[in-house]
Image (cartoon, coloured by chain):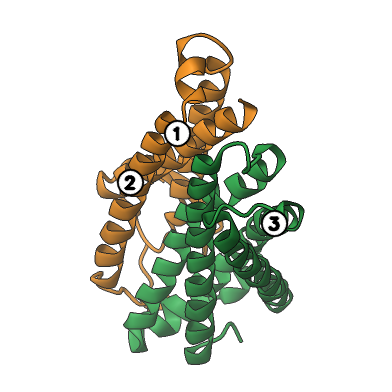
Chain colours: A green, B orange
């Protein structure tokens, strides 16, 4: 068999996966709440700005932490799950994982941007920018939901073990 | 004004990230590839063996996006760019361009990644690729 023990962080894969999942739970909660707050912004109601900004900061930090933890588990997954199993028996799930990783990467700057804008944006003063901000929030929320569902589906087919 | 500058820098960074990520993948640029079984990195356009390109592509796109954000941020402190960014129409135009880049990225990767040919690892190390 391929010597998976030599893969970086392989010995800590379960702990890292648990932390990755825990961070993803925080992230999906914050991203969903933030996206729901955006319905007020789209109607021109900015009364809940303080709460919205808390969610935005949690989304931003949570996204980066989830992303980094996922990156540490990735080599173990690539060898043990995808290389040895999914590519041979369930290639559709290999593709699903690749999509999850690439979409997460492509949305990283948007998620970080939400956090940065939480410190500077005054939505009542610039409602046009608030609409762009709302679109960013909805995009991050959609990608997070897609990634969480894809991750659960892939793990249901073959986990890190 | 500060919010507009942050917005402009972020949206440009997002656009550059998407363009570089797509160009590096589709154009097969030379990138750092990670070989997880050998725990080593190699800078090459095409991997020779079992390697991961996601780390290198993401890192390259991040560096390019950070540089773009820094440039926009510093140039928008004063002058004509500062005045242009103060207008919401400018930010909306950048946002629309960024959304288009993102859409192209999502469609391109959605298509290519669901139409790739899987190459499973050999179950025996004797037949593993060099």
Residue B28 shown left or right of residue A113 in the figure: left
Residue A58 shown left or right of residue A8 in the figure: right
Displayed quadrant of residue A89: bottom left
Q: Mark yes or no: residue B58 visible.
A: yes
Q: Mark yes or no: residue B45 visible.
A: no
Q: Which residue is mark 2?
A: B101
Distance between the alpha carbons at the discs numbered 2 and 1: 15 Å
Residue A140 shown left or right of residue A5 in the figure: left
Displayed quadrant of residue B77: top right
Q: Foreground residue, A4 or B81?
A: B81
The chain holding disc 2 is B
The reply to whether label 2 and label 1 mark residues of one chain is: yes
Reply above or below: A41 against A7.
above
Sequence-first tag of 2 and 1: 1
Mark number displayed over residue A52: 3
Q: Which residue is mark 1?
A: B91
The residue located at (61%, 25%) in the rendering is B1
Displayed quadrant of residue A94: bottom left
Bin the neighbour count of mark 2 within 10 Å (Cα to Cα): few under 14, some 14-19, many 20 and up: some
Percent x, y of residue A22 = 72, 74
**Callout 2–callout 1 Cβ contact below 8 Å:** no
Bin the neighbour count of mark 1 within 10 Å (Cα to Cα): few under 14, some 14-19, many 20 and up: many
The chain holding disc 1 is B
Mark whose residue sits in front, 3 or 2: 3
**Callout 3–callout 2 Cβ contact below 8 Å:** no
Q: Residue furthest top?
A: B79
SS for tag 2? helix
SS for tag 3? helix
Distance between the alpha carbons at the discs numbered 1 and 3: 22 Å
Percent x, y of residue A13 = 67, 74
């Amino acid at each position: 068999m391929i010597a998976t023990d030599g893969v970086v962080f392989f010995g800590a894969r379960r702990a890292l996966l648990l932390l990755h999942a825990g961070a993803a739970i925080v992230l999906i909660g914050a991203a969903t709440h933030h996206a729901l707050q955006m319905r007020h912004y789209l109607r021109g109601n900015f009364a809940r700005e303080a709460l919205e900004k808390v969610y935005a900061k949690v989304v931003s930090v949570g996204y980066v932490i989830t992303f980094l933890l996922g990156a540490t588990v990735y080599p173990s997954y690539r060898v043990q799950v995808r290389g040895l199993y999914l590519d041979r028996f369930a290639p559709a799930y290999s593709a699903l994982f690749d999509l999850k990783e690439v979409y997460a990467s492509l949305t990283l700057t948007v998620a970080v941007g939400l956090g940065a804008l939480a410190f500077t944006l005054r939505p009542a003063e610039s409602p046009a920018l608030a609409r762009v901000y709302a679109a960013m929030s909805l995009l991050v929320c959609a990608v997070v939901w897609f990634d969480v569902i894809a991750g659960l589906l892939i793990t249901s087919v073959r986990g890190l073990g | 004004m500060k919010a507009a500058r942050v917005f402009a820098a972020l949206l440009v960074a997002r656009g550059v990230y998407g363009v570089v990520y797509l160009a590096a993948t589709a154009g097969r640029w030379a990138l750092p590839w990670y070989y997880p079984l050998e725990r080593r990195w190699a800078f090459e356009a095409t991997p020779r063996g079992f390697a991961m390109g996601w780390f290198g592509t993401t890192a390259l796109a991040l560096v390019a996006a950070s540089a773009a954000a820094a440039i926009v941020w510093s140039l928008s402190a004063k002058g004509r760019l500062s005045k242009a960014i103060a207008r919401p129409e400018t930010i909306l135009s950048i946002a629309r361009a960024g959304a288009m880049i993102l859409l192209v990225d999502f469609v391109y990767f959605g298509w290519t990644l669901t139409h790739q040919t899987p190459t499973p690892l050999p179950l025996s190390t004797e037949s593993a690729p060099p």
